[in-house]
């Protein structure tokens, strides 16, 4: 059986991670098409022993394509996603363009894989912070419904792409050389600094990233009653987001029960060594497929032992983006 796959945005950080994971996971494609902007069109690249010429993304890019992995801007996805779907291709889109569209499934394979059956040519990949936070929360929620989540994120600059990662590297050197770091990708210097997530602030005081986590979690869980509040922050880390998550459950639950549930959960690895003070860290989560979970402890401020705190770390480029999309594509196959 032939299976033709297009990668839109192949030259970006997530696009390159697509290639790494497609190779690692022996994805059963028989043919690939590499797509990018006009700036990269015409360049050659090697993948799986074959030479490819990058093509400019256009309206005729998806003729004969079965699956398209999109990692482009929301504007690009809104324009070309429907065109690809109309051509008979199933789009797995990594942008925010279609996530809250009621007719577009928003999928995390560990949580709601059955949702892909409702697709009309486009499947949305959730926000990276949403994925990293809810993969470990879902198995707990299934066992003992979560009433409220309080999430604080520590987000790596990789969420803004290669340019942001290079900017952090450059700014660190500038500071060490006694120079004033000059921000370009962000409004503020990211070297030796933390700042509120760089997305737009709404009238309610929450930024776009924070509202994404709230709305997407409710859609993926199929639960509009779960109460969620978030604070999203950029930290001077190259790759891998961390999140502090406080959970209020319907019924009492102990840390031991949480560890037992998560030890059997797909996509999760427990790193919770109290004796050696060893818990999830970006340096250990980077390049990993699993979400690391630790600091599992009772929240004594919530009555009747219905509160739990956890701390998680997950590779934003991998499970937070490229891996989740490829897992969706694997379900399609």
Image: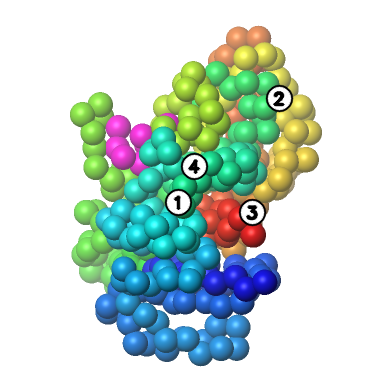
For marks 2 and 4 on the same chain, the one whose residue lies earlier in the sequence = 4
The answer for how far apart the CA atoms under marks 2 and 1 are is: 31 Å
Magenta stretch: dominant secondary structure: helix
Residue at point 58% right, 44% down?
Answer: 117
Image height of 307 relative to 211, above or below: above
Q: Where does residue 181 sit, x and y in percent of width and height?
A: 24, 64
Q: Quadrant of the N terminus?
A: bottom right
Say which label, 2 or 1, has the lower sequence index: 1
Above or below, 146 against 20 in this view is above
**Mark 4 highlights which residue?**
105
Q: Which residue has dot 1 on it?
A: 122
Q: How is the image coloured?
A: rainbow
- Magenta range is 206-214
Whether tag 2 and tag 4 are in contact, CB under 8 A, the answer is no
Q: Earlier in the sequence, mark 3 or mark 2?
A: 2
In screen coordinates, is 127 left or right of 289?
A: left
Specify the label residue 286 is tagged with: none
For residue 143, which numbered disc appears in the image? 2
- Residue at image coords 22%, 54%: 187
CA gap, disc 4 to disc 1?
Answer: 8 Å
């Amino acid at each position: 059986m032939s299976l033709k796959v297009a990668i839109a945005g192949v030259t970006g950080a997530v696009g390159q991670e697509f290639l790494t994971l497609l190779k690692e996971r022996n994805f059963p494609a028989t043919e690939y098409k590499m797509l990018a902007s006009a700036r990269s069109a015409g360049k050659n690249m090697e993948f799986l022993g074959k030479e490819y010429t990058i093509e400019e993304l256009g309206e005729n890019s998806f003729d004969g394509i079965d699956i398209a992995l999109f990692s482009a801007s929301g504007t690009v996805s809104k324009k070309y996603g429907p065109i690809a779907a109309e051509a008979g291709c199933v789009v797995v889109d990594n942008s925010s363009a279609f996530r809250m569209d009621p007719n577009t499934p928003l999928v995390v394979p560990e949580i709601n894989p059955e949702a892909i059956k409702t697709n009309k040519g486009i499947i949305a990949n959730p926000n990276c912070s949403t994925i990293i936070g809810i993969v470990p929360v879902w198995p707990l929620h299934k066992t003992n419904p979560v009433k409220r989540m309080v999430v604080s994120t520590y987000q790596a600059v990789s969420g803004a792409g290669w340019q942001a990662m290079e900017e952090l590297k450059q700014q660190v050197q500038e500071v060490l050389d006694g120079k004033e770091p000059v921000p370009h990708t962000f409004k503020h210097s990211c070297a030796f600094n933390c700042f509120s997530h760089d997305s737009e602030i709404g009238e309610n005081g929450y930024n776009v990233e924070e509202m994404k986590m709230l709305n997407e979690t409710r859609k993926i869980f199929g639960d509009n009653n779960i109460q969620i509040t978030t604070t999203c922050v950029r930290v001077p880390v190259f790759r891998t987001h961390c999140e502090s998550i406080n959970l209020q459950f319907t019924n009492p639950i102990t840390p031991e029960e949480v560890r037992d549930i998560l030890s059997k959960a797909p996509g999760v690895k427990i790193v919770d060594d109290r004796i050696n003070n060893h818990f999830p860290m970006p340096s250990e989560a980077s390049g990993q497929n699993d979400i690391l979970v630790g600091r599992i402890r009772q929240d004594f401020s919530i009555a009747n032992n219905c509160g739990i705190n956890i701390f998680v770390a997950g590779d934003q480029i991998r499970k937070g983006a490229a891996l989740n999309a490829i897992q969706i594509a694997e379900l399609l196959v």
